[in-house]
Structure formats: structure tokens, C-alpha cells
Image (cartoon, coloured by chain):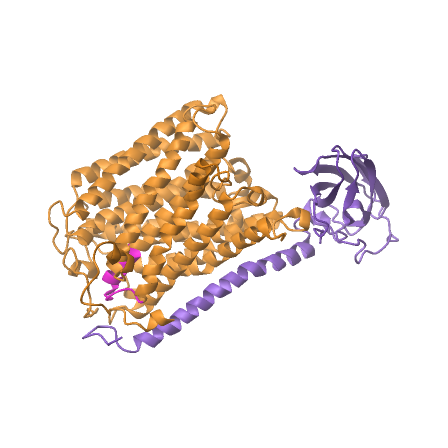
Chain colours: A orange, B purple
Amino acid sequence: MDIATHHPAQHHAAHPTGVLRWLTTTNHKDIGTLYLSFALVMFFVGGLMILAVRAELFQPGLQLMQPDFFNQLIGVHALVMIFAALMPAATGFANWMIPLMIGAPDMALPRLNNWGFWLLPPAAFLLTLPFLLALFGIGSGAIDTGWTFYAPLSIQGGMGIDFAIFAVHLLGISSIMGSINIIATIFNLRAPGMTLMKMPLFAWGWLITAFLLIATIPVLAGAVTMLLTDRHFGTHFFQAAGGGDPILFQHLFWFFGHPEVYILLLPVWGLIPHILSAFSRKPIYGYKAQVWSFAAIGILSVIVWAHHFFTAGLPVPALIYFMFSTMSISLPLAVLFFCWIATMWRGAMSFETPMLFATGFIVLFGIAGLTGLILADVAADAQYHHSYFVVAHFHYALFAGGIMGVMAGVYYWLPKWTGRRYSETLGKWHFWLTVVSFNLTFMPQFFLGLAGMPRRIPDYALQFAEFNAISTVGAFILGVSQLLFAWNAIRCMGGKGQPAEARAWEGARGLEWELPSPPPHHTWEIQPEVK
Amino acid sequence: MTSGPSQAPTSPTQPSIRRLVVRLLLMVTAAFAFGWAMVPFYDVLCKVTGLNGKTPGFQAGGLAGAAPAPSAIDRTRTVTVEFTGTVMPGLPWDMRPLTASLDLHPGELQQVKYLVRNTSDRTIVGQAIPSVSPGQAAQHFQKLDCFCFRQQTLAPGEAREMPLTFIVKPEIDRDIRQITLSYAFYNIEEPRREAR
């Protein structure tokens, strides 16, 4: 508990420079930059993996790889995108923006913050190392069970699964430390006068996320630890031969796994209203309703997990309970959609890149929500389960709802972070290429799923060939388009582009816009008064 | 550590952060413990409700708490019991039920046999794990004796008829007219791996 006793704004006059600066930094802005840069790199790593998968699926038959390698790619793609791209991106936002938005001088536990970040690169290394080892003939490659680690398959697999288990342990510890830090910051370091119900929605979204992480990541850690002991120490938690039950693993995994969806999405739902309000030049509509919706979704998310395995043989009363509880999440979600649209209603709207991404997010994430309702229906789910319909659904949720939301936030705050304006032309090209190629990639997958194509297979029947070819073309355009994003962001980080004024967007509200762009290394050492 | 110059957070902030962090760490520990507590909880839940198709007689030694042949046989209705079995990967055995399906009255004592053959050239120990479907029927499916109560050892090429004696209790729901009993046979290399 040493960490907590150090003064948050404590700093030395002389900063280390070069690599040492980034290794030892406790500054929330530096750490935010580290998180976001790491997320961007891993976004491309995970993206390359899935482009290899899509290339294999371009035509029926096996052209590029064998099924075992295919299975490794899809599993590691998911783990990288969820744990090493989207979650770190959200934590990067939290680090950069929460202190600026609530008028705090830094995060409450700056050293823990540093540690939390520097656990991530080793974890990502552990996750992908088995690929390299396999090249040298050691082991059979990375985890090949898909990201869900389902037992008993994961009990039988090679050492890639052990690597993934340890990587998940590290990533989990990092997330828990990040969450503790965010809660401590929000509860203790708000500017005087900023009550919880005056706090920016982004901070609210993250507060709920942090509590969800604390409640569910330890359960995942426990479940994968049980898996580890089943694999190596002769226990039978999930081995039917010894009296265990593989279905128990599914319960434990999804007790974490469903809240994880909202862990990925709540920070985005928090930042979208700020953008909608800024570019509609109106205050956020229904602030309280949104806060309560966040809380309701947070609570509901931990009691609906079994809809992920409706077909595993649950008793009918349980099926009915999980169906209705899952569907009830659409009520607070509908409130959020209503508030987002009402924020734009009759506003003086303009469509700069952040606003394009925010509105695109609303439309595409709406499709994710509606198809989620279909999957939540027990009777219908028997057909859609483990089909490409599910793949399309959760990519609408996590790419359009997650990553496009994150990109909206990056474009929105990039002028604040770097003091430079990104190229609006490139940004608009990026948006339109992304939104078109995203739909080109994933819309056909709904049809594939309806037609009965199962997920996680490297080869498929001829009847699925056209839609798969379209999807692959879309995926490659989507992947290449993201280079525009990286280039645009890196250009600003390198000091190119028009200088940005303190209030980079004329309609933007909030404490962060009171500071110069870019903000000095230390901000809000004198906390602002909030009336 | 020296105190910083005119910094904003007031002094009571520090102990309150420490208190909060301790509480949050307790929450993390509680969540971790909750995950592990789910294991016995799930076991008990399944035992009480029969959700995972495990039958009450399914315990080492058998006959655990089993009432011997009940006096009442419900002749007003018939239940069909179907028998099936799967040999899990890693066990070079064949198995098939000698009776594929049986019509019986609840309360009747019945015996069926499975024919199990070791197709390999080594001695192997196997353990059969039963599962009853639908799950609601599991708690009324009473095994008096079963080859799944013990590990089975088969010599190279040996074939054996393995018996199962059971009763479908008359308390079984009237809506259940068909029950499927399925066995999964596992390779048990170490003798200590005994079914609970």
C-alpha cells in the first residue's frame, strides 16, 4: 500500500529522457499515450491475423494454411483485439481524459498506473510467443480453442493454451489495477463542487466499467486457473471422467464474458454523448437517464450470462429466465439510443470526422443491438448458435460499437492531446472507407449464418463461396483503410498539422477544453471550482 | 518524500484513497473467491435438481441412500427408456447396449446389459460416466447396481457384458414418457481417478 501514500502530484524537477522516461513515467498523460499507442499497434497485429484468416476463406478449400494454424489465428485474433487493443484503448482514454475532465492533477495511484501498463507488453508477448516457438519446432503453436478456452478441448490442447492462460492472468491483473486506480481517482480527486451527478458521462461510463472489471475479471482468473490445474495437476474441475463438468467452465467463463462486452462498450457510450453534444451545439440530452441506464446495464450484465450457451442443454426454466433477462437489457439501451438521438435533435449539426464516426456508431451499433435481440430468443438461437450470424452480430457490436466509437473519441480529442489538427480530408476518407468496407465485410456474414455456415471453420461448402469472397474483399479494404487513421494520428503526434486552439471544437463543453492544447505536462494542480 | 508546493488535493485525500483501495482489493478477493465457490455450489445445485443429468445412485460404492425395490409399481403408465453409449477419444474400446430400448412401468426393477470389448492389445482401465436426459428425470432414475459404479479393467481383446440394474421411481413426472440414458466411457490411466 506504499503507492497510496505518495502524493499524486509529486514529481521531480528533472525528468528522465528517452526510453527511461516512458518506462518510469507516472504521468497520466504519458501513460495514456502509452496505452493508446500499444492499442494501435496491437490493433494492427490482430488485424493482420484476421486478414490471413479472411484470405484463407476467400475460396472454399484449403489454400494457405492448415486447420490447426487457422484455429490458432482466430483465437489469438480475438484475445488480442479484446484484451490488447480495445481494453487498453479504453484505459488510455481513461488515463488521458478522466483527470482532465474532472479537474484532477493526475490519477490517484500513479505508480500503480505505470505498473498496470507495463504488464501489457509481456502479456501480449506471451500470447503470441507460441507462434514463434512453433516455427522452431517447439510446441504446436498458439492457443487453438478460440478465445473462449472451452473445456474439455482446452484440457487436451498444446502448450499454447498454457501461454494464453498466463497471458490472461497478466492482462487481468493489469485491468484490475487500472480499475482500482480509476475508481480511486473518481471518488477522491474530483474538482471541488463536482458532485457525482455533475461528473462527465465519460467518467460515469468508466466508473461502471471499473466496477464490472473488479467483479468479473477475478472469476475469469479463477476459471483459467482451474483449467491450468486440470491440465497439469490432475484435478477434475471440468473433466467428466473424474466427476467434473465441462458446462461449469462455460458458466464461469461467461459470467466474466458477458459483462466483458459492456466493459468494452461502456467507455464508448460515455464518450459518444460528448461528441454528439459538441457537434450539435446543444447540451447532452437526458444526462441522468443515461447515468441510470449505465448503472442498470452494468447490473443486468452480470445476470444474463447463459444466453451464450442456450444450446448446451439448460433446463427450460433457466432458458426462459436467461432469455427474458437478456432481452430486458434492451430497455436501458433503448433509453441511451433515445438520448443520443435527442441530443442531436434540432441541433446546429456539422459533420466533422468525430461526428461522422459518432453517428455511424449509432446506426451500426443499432444493428448490433437488434440482431442481439434475435440471438437472445431461445427458439431462434438454436438455429443461429455458432453460426456466422453470431460473428457478424458481435463485430457490429465490437467493431462498430467499440472500435469506431474509440476512433470517434480519438479524432475528437486528438487536437487536445497533440495540439495539432489532424487532416479533415484524410479523416473523412477514413470514415467513409471504414463504414462501407465494414458493411461489405460483415453484412454478408449475417446471410452466411442464416444459410447455416458455422463459425471457426477453415473450409466450407460451395454454396457459401460468393458471400465469403465479398466478405474477404471488404476485410482487406477495411484493413488497409485503417492505415489512414494511423497516419493521421501519427502525423499529429509528430507535430504536423494546423495548431489547435484550447477549445478545439466551438461546441465542445467540459473542463478539458479550458486547458491549452496540448495541455502542459502537469495540469489542474490548482483544481477548478465547479458550480 | 516531501510535501509538494501548493498542490490541490487536500490532506484528507490520502487516507481516504488508502481506505478505498483496501476496500476495492477486498472486492477483488471476494470476486475471486466467488468464482471458486461456484464449483461446489454448482455441484450441489446439480445434485438437488439433476440439472446435468447425473443420477442419484451415481456414487462410488453405489446404492447411496437408495431405497430398495419400492412396493408400488405404477401400472397405469409406461415409460420408454433408451440406452446409448459413446467411447471417448483415447479409449480403444467398443461398446453397445444389448437392449436398445425398453418399455417399463415406473417402479419395476429392470436389468439391461452393455457389451464392451477391448479392441487393443493392452490392458486398459475405463470409467463410464452416465447422463440422463431430460435432466428432470435424472433424480427419479435410481440405479441399484451399475458398471459405472466401478472402474472396469479389460484385458487385450476381452469382451464383457456389463449389467445395469435400475428402477424408474413412480414419483417421476407424468409428462415424461421417454428417458435416454447415455454412457461416456473414459480411459482412466491412473487408478486414483475415481468418479465422485
Q: Is residue A450 left or right of residue B186?
A: left
**Which residue: 41% across, 53% down?**
A171
Query: Is residue A54 depicted above or below A352 in this figure?
Result: above
Q: Main secondary structure of the magenta part?
A: helix
Image quadrant of residue B179?
A: top right
Front one among A285 and A155: A155
Residue A510 can be seen in this image? no
**Which residue: 22% across, 56% down?**
A283
Q: Extreme bottom residue here?
A: B12
Residue A440 point in image, percent of width and height? 34, 31
What range of the chain is rendered magenta? A93-108
Q: Extreme right residue here?
A: B71
Does the magenta run of residues contain A95? yes
User: What is the quadrant of the C terminus of chain A in the image?
Assistant: bottom left
Residue A376 can be seen in this image? yes
Q: Is residue B112 left or right of residue B196?
A: right
**Which residue: 63% across, 52% down?**
A234
Does the magenta run of residues contain A243? no
Front one among B27 and A227: A227
Residue A331 point in image, percent of width and height? 42, 51
Image quadrant of residue A191?
A: bottom left
Q: Extreme front residue here?
A: A136
Q: Is residue A65 left or right of residue A475?
A: right
User: What is the quadrant of the N terminus of chain A in the image?
Assistant: bottom left
Residue A21 point in image, percent of width and height? 24, 58
Residue B109 point in image, percent of width and height? 86, 46
